[in-house]
Amino acid sequence: MHFATLWHSLGQYTVIGITQGAIYALFALGYTLVYGVLRLINFAHSEVFLVGTYAAVLTWNAAGYDQNAAPPGIPAALGLLLLALIAAMLASALTALGIELVAYRPLRRRNAPPLAFLITAIGASVAISEFVGILTHRNPHGMPRIVTQKTVLSIGSTSITNLQLGIMVTALVMMAGLDQFIRRSRMGRGVRAVAQDPNTAALMGVNKDRVISLVFLLGGLMAGVAALMYNLKIGDTRYNSGFDLGVKAFTAAVLGGIGNLRGALLGGLVLGVAESYGSGVFGSQWQDVVAFVLLVLILLVRPTGLLGETLGRARA
Amino acid sequence: MTEIDSTAPDGPEGTGPDTAADSPQRNGTAPAGPGRRAFRGRLPLPPWARKAAVPAAVLIAALLPYAGDVPVIGVVATTGIDWPSALFNMSYFVLLALGLNVVVGFAGLLDLGYVGFFAVGAYTMALLASPDSQLHAHWPWLLCVPAAIAMAMISGVILGWPTLRLRGDYLAIVTLGFAEIIRLTATGSSFLRGERGFTDLPHPPGSYADGSPVFSVTDATPYYWLGLAVILVVIVVVRNLERSRVGRSWLAIREDEEAAEIMGVRTIKYKLWAFAIGAAIGGLGGVMFAGEQGFLNSQTFLLLFSILVLAGVVMGGAGSIPGAILGGALISYIPDRLRGVEVAGTDIFEYRFMFFGIMIILIMIFRPQGLIPNRRRAMELSDRAEEVPVV
């Protein structure tokens, strides 16, 4: 127990936690969107993220930047980031749509019980992750140094690097954009309608299949952004990095109230900060235990998560 | 319900949508229409064959270790792993599938962290019996078994007591978290020895006439028979439970928890029972596994393990005992079968889980209710499909 350590650099632990939490939150959106509309845990979402991490790093490699390359100048770095972002978002979105098409749509047509969806999702997840594992011989794939980390902001003893600031700002912008999209746009209204009552929405002329594809697409795009951030922050990726992070992201979604977009943000941040504090107090090998214990405790007090399930409601 | 189904299985199929909607069970037709009637898990056998089927199945299962010696089967026999070991692996997966089937299939509680109970059972044994343990207890195998079952059961109740008020998917994530907590604690604490693990776990007692022990790491056949015997006992227990007051309460809870509660079913109590029984069987599986391996560490209890077992249960047909047996055997056998098989110069074993993933997708697409669906559950589902056409 090192409460003094934590107390001493509380701000630093908070910044680290929020950065990690921002990635969880973006990742968690995919779980939340799909759950809100289909009421099923999209277990294969972790692989959507995984494909995104590889798409980003392979883009960099194709542009001539591998693990040992010298960091590019600022304009080139921005270009590379944008390129990788587009590649990751596209690859993740396509993977998500593909999973929907192969693993979920045939079952929907056959009116399968909910558990069957969970199992095909698990099947898709295992198959994709193993496929990547075979292609990469299960070795980690190192990242080129695109962003040179330096402190851009310091408040007292707390310092924030450019990367941390970038991750937080990007995540917030993406979340706010998605939130507004679901709340205000015509397609967003369709999503909310299907989430609230699929049959009535269908009777009112909402194309349910299109809405379902849309939520998978949106979840995939967000996972792509999260994947790029993960690459920059962690520095390598491997065939099972999606699964490990996916468990956390799903935890974040449940923590905030699954099916609730703002809940995903709150859940992600709470989880990230709790983990960070946990590693400060008990040591980093216990941070995941802290996260799960926190989850259990919160669900005992609020059985549907911090903000409850509300994708169908007007607040979205 | 059984009567109706067996006397009028081929009811009026072409009598129009009105009759079909009135009595979905009576005409036994899946909503998809004629020609796609759900298989309800009962083979059209004469009574004497039905009676003989169980002893025959047990006998065949008991003789399986010798299947490799039969020339016809020997040609296609598993190559990369010795056959008795593959059989033993199947036996504890079947055991776990039977246990998880109680939780998921009977009571309808989604448990993603079943490996947690398996780990509790195995670690109880390791702590009580291994020379590496700080307890220095050196208990024999036979004493460890009840202790491990009891510990697993207690952990099931401890986990279930506060969390069983949660519904569906929230329960799923809490159970998943529980399994992760156990694994991470085992990895991080010196008392549970992390990845160094425990060695020299005891084998069950017994020796041949020449003094060599019956149970050892070199020969898995006695372990397989032990597993088979345990499975038989578990099947009898679980089957009787399903047909008792407890089983009917599980059914009511699975179908509609609110309605069950209003009708006077004590839902928390029976859900807790399902959890505890499932946990006990998981713990038993853990002891069996730890004994045969002689070694365990925290890497044994990955989350993928529970997910595999869950896939087995649902693939076989949730709520169906034959289904759980088949599903459990398949999840263990498919990867083992691919071990050492070479196609075009590459070892297929590397691809085993990829094939496995694709295979379970295909099985679920073509048989959404599982390979051997529970008959009553299949009816419930086709019933429900008529009420709510789409999700």
Image (cartoon, coloured by chain):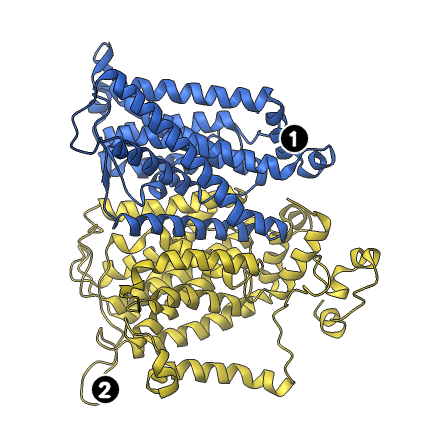
Chain colours: A blue, B yellow
Q: Which residue is mark 1?
A: A193
Q: Which residue is at a point 48% across and 44% down the rendered structure image? A: A98
Q: Nearer the viewer, residue A111 or A6?
A: A111
Residue A154 x, y percent position in the rendering: 24, 11
Secondary structure, mark 2, is loop
Q: Residues within 10 Å of mark 2 (few under 14, many from 20)?
A: few
Identity, as a three-letter code, of the amino acid under mark 1 = Ala
Question: In which chain is the residue bearing label 2?
Answer: B
Q: Nearer the viewer, residue A254 or B333?
A: B333
Q: CA distance from mark 1 to mark 2?
A: 71 Å
Q: Which residue is at a point 44% across and 53% down the rendered structure image? A: A123
Instruction: State whether residue B259 is above or below residue A23.
Output: below
Q: Which residue is at a point 41% across and 36% down the rendered structure image? A: A91
Which residue reaches farthest bottom?
A: B209
Identity, as a three-letter code, of the amino acid under mark 2 = Tyr
Q: Quadrant of residue A16?
A: top left
Q: Which residue is at a point 56% across and 67% down the rendered structure image? A: B372
User: Could you say which disc has been placed on residue A307 in the image?
Assistant: none
Quadrant for the N terminus of chain B in the image? bottom right
User: Could you say which disc has been placed on residue B208 in the image?
Assistant: 2
Residue B225 x, y percent position in the rendering: 36, 78
Quadrant for the C terminus of chain B in the image? top right
Nearest to the eye among marks 1 and 2: give it.
1
Q: Is residue A278 visible?
A: no
Residue B36 x, y percent position in the rendering: 67, 63
Q: In the image, is A239 to the left or to the right of A47?
A: left
Q: Nearer the viewer, residue A247 or A44?
A: A44
Secondary structure, mark 1, is helix
Q: In the image, is B120 to the left or to the right of B261?
A: left
Q: Quadrant of residue A252?
A: top left
